[in-house]
Structures are given as C-alpha cells and as structure tokens.
Image (spheres, coloured by chain):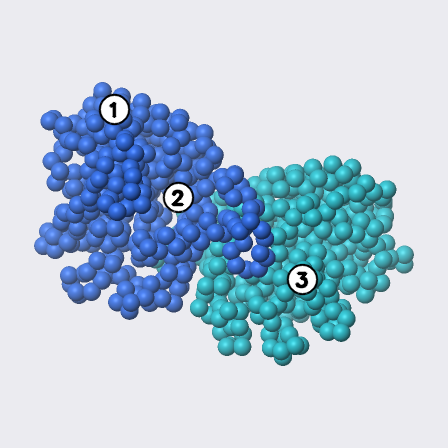
Chain colours: A blue, B cyan
Amino acid sequence: MRHDPESVGFVETQQVRLFTRDEPLTLASGRTLGPVDVAYETYGRLNADRSNAVMICHALTGDAHAAGWHVGAKGPGWWDNLIGPGKPLDTERFFVVCANLIGGCRGSTGPSSIDPATGKAYGLSFPLLAIADFVEVHRALVRHLGIGRLLAVVGGSMGGMQALEWSLSYPDEVAHAVIIASSSRLTAQNIAFSAVARRAIMDDPHFLGGDYEAAGVSPNVGLSIARMMAHITYLSEDAFTEKFGRSPQNGERTPGFGIDFAVESYLDHQAETFLERFDALSYLYLTRVMDYFDPFTDHALPRLERPVRYLVVSFDTDWRFSTSHSRRIVRHLEGARYPVTFREIKSPWGHDSFLLVIDDYHATLRAWFDRALEVGT
Amino acid sequence: MRHDPESVGFVETQQVRLFTRDEPLTLASGRTLGPVDVAYETYGRLNADRSNAVMICHALTGDAHAAGWHVGAKGPGWWDNLIGPGKPLDTERFFVVCANLIGGCRGSTGPSSIDPATGKAYGLSFPLLAIADFVEVHRALVRHLGIGRLLAVVGGSMGGMQALEWSLSYPDEVAHAVIIASSSRLTAQNIAFSAVARRAIMDDPHFLGGDYEAAGVSPNVGLSIARMMAHITYLSEDAFTEKFGRSPQNGERTPGFGIDFAVESYLDHQAETFLERFDALSYLYLTRVMDYFDPFTDHALPRLERPVRYLVVSFDTDWRFSTSHSRRIVRHLEGARYPVTFREIKSPWGHDSFLLVIDDYHATLRAWFDRALEVGT
C-alpha cells in the first residue's frame, strides 16, 4: 500500500447517533425516523474561531470516505484528488467533513438497518426521503462537531443538490455553496434512466419485495444492470470511444454473446465491484430522492442581506446533467440577486469529470476556495 | 377498425421456404442454416419490365408488415405513413417488398424455430448472424419474386445497414440505396447500451441458457428492461421533455416506487406491448449483428462504371445514430466516387424520426423516389 505525499494519510470512518428513537428525525414527508446513525470522516483541523469548516456532500453511490486512506485499502477516498495538503481543498487550512447519506448503506441508517419497531431490517418500510432530509441530518452532524456556520458546502451531482438545498433553506448557516455537475430538476430522460434501473432491481426475483436480506439473497442481477446503465450516462460518447473504441477485450474478436468488446468488459467490471459495496434498496431510495427534487418550485427565494455566495460548475460533455441544468440553477439564483460565479469547464469525460483532475476545474476550485477563506464565514 | 383512404388496404403476410435442409444457406461465418423460411409482404404491382421493385429492410424490432392493415389489427404496418397510394413510396407506381429478418421471431426462421437436427428449438445453438446474411436471404426472396435488379433498397436504422451492405456487395443488383438514421460502425456507447440489454436478458433466471421456451417460461423481466432502455435512446432528451416533462401520471403526485411520473408509465407500456410481439433470443441475435457490422473495413470499394446512387439521411437530434454516423457513410461512399445525396433533417424527435411523418423528410424521400423511377434500374 502506498499513498501520495499530499494525502491526508490514514483515516477512519466514525459513527455518531444524531437522532434517537425517542427523539427522532422528522422527515420532509412528515414521517419520523429514529435512531439515525451517521458515518462520517473529517480531514484537517477546525480553527479556533470555527470559521474554516467545509462540508462535502456525496453523490448517489459515494460515502463518507472522501479523502485519505483506510488501512488495507487498495485506493484512497473518492475525492482524494481534491482534498489534502496543498490540494484545492487544502487540509492545512480547511477543516473538511464528509458524511454518508441516510438511506445509504455505508454506515448511516438506511433501509437495510434494523427497524426498532419490528427488530427486522426496514426494507421497503423505510420512509421515502428527500434532499431536505439529508440536509437536516448533516446539519445535526455539523452542530455535533461544534460548527455554527459553514464556510462552504460542496457537492457534485446529487451532492450539488444537497449544497443547493442547504443554501436555500438555511442561508444563515452557510457562507458559500459549490454546486458541480448537478441539477435542480431532473428531466424526463433523467427520470427514465433511473426508472429503468429501479425496475431492474425491483423485478429481480431475488428482490423479494425488499426483504431479500432476511432470505439470504440479493437482487444482484438487477443491481448490476442498474450500475452498468448508469455508467453509460457517466461518460460522454467521445470518452467511451477514446477509452474503448471497438477494441476486442482479448486482442482478437471472439464473436458470440460473451464479453468480446473492451467496453463490455469495462461495464462488467463496474457491476462486479459495485455489488461488493452497494445495496439494492439504497439504490432505490437514493435515486428516487433525485426524481422528486425541485427546490425552485418548493422554495420562494427571499432577498437576503447576506446571501450565500455560489459557485456553479458544469462540464461541456456531461449529458447526464448537462450545462443546461446548471444554467437553470444560475438563472434562479441570479433572479434572486444572489452572487453566482458560473463556469462551464471543457472536459472530454462527461459527468464523471467532477471526480477527475482537470486542470481548469481544479484551478477554478482552488481559486474559489482561497477566496472563500478570505471572505470568511 | 378504420384505415385511411391512402392505405394499401388489407394485406396478409406470406411465407416462403428459400433454403432447405439439403440446400442450406451458407452464412458469413461459414456455418449453414436450413431450412430457411421467410415471411414477407408486397404492396403495389411489379411492372412489365420488372423495373419498379423497392425492397424495404426493417429495423431491430420491425417485421414484414410494413404497410396496410391486417384483418382485426388495431393499427397499420410500421411504415404505413411512407408506403401507399400517393405516399412517397407510391404503390400506384412502385412494387414494394418487405421481409422479416432471419434471427427474428415474426415468421422467418430464428432461434425459436425448430432445429431439424434435434427436433427442438435452436435456442443459443442458432448460428450467429451478420448483416450480410440478411442480404443473402433477401436476395433469394427477390429472385423468388422474379426480380433481377432492384430499383431501390431502403432502410432505417438496422434497415439502413442492410441497404448499405447490399449495395456494397452487389452493386449490379441494386440501382438506388436509401440509408436512413443508420450507422456503418457502432460506437463503444452504442455497443454498451446493447450489451447491458443483452445482459438483462441472459441473466434473467427465466432465460435458462436460452431454452426457456421448452420450459414454458420467458425472460420477460430482462426483455422489458432491454426494451425500456432502448426506448430512452430512440427519443431525444428534448422530445422526452416535450412529451412528458415531469408530469405526474395520475394528475397528482403519488410518491413512492410505483409509477408516478408520466414517463414511467410510457416506458412501462412500451415494455408490456413489446413482450406480446417479441422474443428474447431474437433480441440477442439481432442486436449482436449490429455490434459486429463494419462494412467499410470488410469491403474494399472498387471504382464502378455504374455505381449505386445513394441517399443518406440523418436527423439532427438523433443520438442513437447521430449525424456523425451518416457523415462517415457519406465520406466512404464519396471517397469511392459513388453518387451520394446527403440530408440532415431537422426534427425534434431523435432516432424515432425515421418512422414519423416529418414534412422535409417525406418530401425529400418523395422527390428522391420520383427521380429514382425516372433514372430507372
């Protein structure tokens, strides 16, 4: 195992109970959820006046492990190229927090957690969630960490939805918001992709109405299909051509219905590794949250004396959440006279770009975080 | 039941045995297939000098029933808006032929046909096919109908691949070729979509290694997923927005994992009606044919004294086979000094446009077929 010298080094995921059965979380739907445990990590140090805290919100299949290395792991956290000493989110200066979403399956309470009312896993009796619920849980974590006001909340894709929702609901608690490759309103095509993915999971005979865990099985076929389909949308068509073209996987063609083209092998590998770390019910809950997200319909935007300062970033070849999604966010924020910096970054890689080192992208974030630190909370 | 006055009226699908077990079809792979039965329909009349025959090649899930009405049917053939008295392919002047592809499941020999060697359905022992094999079968049909040289061969999507292959392999037998919304070489992204679809079918527990029919079951979950995913690629994102937006299916939101958005209902309906008319094994065989199609690598293009005259048509919002696919075809044909007319038609509807009445598109085809008739075979 090795890690680069600019890494935050070895880290461990911590867990905290933020809501209990007696004092549960009230969800946007009106239902309650308790206990609520949350897995999180922190990098860097909170400064004396608690003004350097940056909350990272993860995307659909992310988790709390954004940076650094877990002992024995083959790779670092999912946003390690952004977070660390000397990196755009410089952990010598920023205190960075990342938490696993509720509804997920990576240490926070989700549909595979035990429902205290029944002693069994929630399954489909787990309540439907909203982006606002993620924000409430993460606010509770931030309070638990002794932070009154965040310097910034940052997220890509579904993480950007959380940053947006947080900034609109609690502008007093957030100084800056960074919304990357995200959307304020899924299109019918966006919803269609997720609908087919959920259908693959729920119609898998091993789904068993969501009670698969008790039966010792798992809807792996459906979850694999969902993941492969999603990966098609994460890359631009040109990126697929650049990476795989029509190359055979094994040096020469082996015509048939097995894996022959390199792109087939790539998708197969993505499915296989995903099954090791993700749960089918979480996939249902977290994708459905996005379908219903529509903050500019749900929030009237007041004029604010001290509005949140926004950075909105899109990538020109992203067709999952194309630049038009970001422009829509910018239009609404500017309409309310909130200060917005907008950048469309050139990148051949499509939606996945938000996770990659792209010079203009990282330079933009670096400059913006530096300025945020100057402006302060 | 009603049909419009410009319809060719009531039609019936006919079937003919073109190859026998003793005199089988030799496939591009070197394997043989026999017997080969082919379902076909014809519209209009072959003229005295047999110079007005137009062959229609169908797309992935099409069939021989391109125009007119079957008794008791709820709708006409799949290209009825193009073929009929007074329509662009005017059946008062053209003799139009359409046949179901081998490998399919609509009357021509396919993987669910009985293998005479075993007395059981072929299943996955059915040989792998190539576009060239479709052409050989359709050439045999054309000979059977007493046609020496086709005035035109016409196809959209996978049908366009057949028109292209036919014109390159047998330029003496075809005077004109019309290649619409098609491709000469699938991209990695194109292959990826089909690979996930096939995976959904083959990993369905009811697939049973392809022997599902004998067991009285069907991989309906997998085939539904394949169809829904394909439909996402058949429409442009804007068309999805225009048709469905974020509208709820039942007038108001019913949050949950059921069908709530109108687009979910659309996909569900597409899957349901598809199961009634299509077979999972055929879906595997016919999609795989496209992955391997690469005629400009397989054919050297000779200089010809009397080359085929080409019309290549794309639609500006088609992202399944975008205009770049058509441009590639045009480049190769023009490089060989073959006469090519190329049109990119404006249409909001994406790939599906080739099946729709779009004024500029139909006017282009009408003018081109009129001229073809003048130029002759």
Q: Residue at x 36, y 52 (%)?
A: A274
Kindly identify which residue carries mark 1: A372
| Label 3 Cα neighbours within 10 Å, binned few <14 / some 14-19 / many ≥20 | many
Alpha-carbon span between mark 1 and mark 3: 63 Å
Kindly identify which residue carries mark 2: A186
| Camera sees residue B9 | no
Q: Residue at x 48, y 66 (%)?
A: B220
Q: Position of residue A136 (x, y in %)?
A: 20, 43
Q: Position of residue B321 (x, y in %)?
A: 59, 45
Residue found at the far right of this picture: B49
Asked whether B263 or A225 is in front, the reply is A225
Three-letter code for the amino acid on which mark 2 is drawn: Leu
**Element type where label 1 sits in the image:** helix
Question: Are tags 1 and 3 found on a single chain?
Answer: no
Image quarter (top left, top right, bottom left or bottom right) of the N terminus of chain B: bottom right
Q: Residue at x 70, y 53 (%)?
A: B162
Determine whether, in the image, residue A190 is placed left or right of residue B114. left
Kindly identify which residue carries mark 3: B101
Q: Is residue A57 above or below residue B108?
A: above
**Element type where label 2 sits in the image:** loop
Three-letter code for the amino acid on which mark 1 is drawn: Ala
Q: Position of residue B291 (x, y in %)?
A: 59, 52
* Mark 3 chain: B
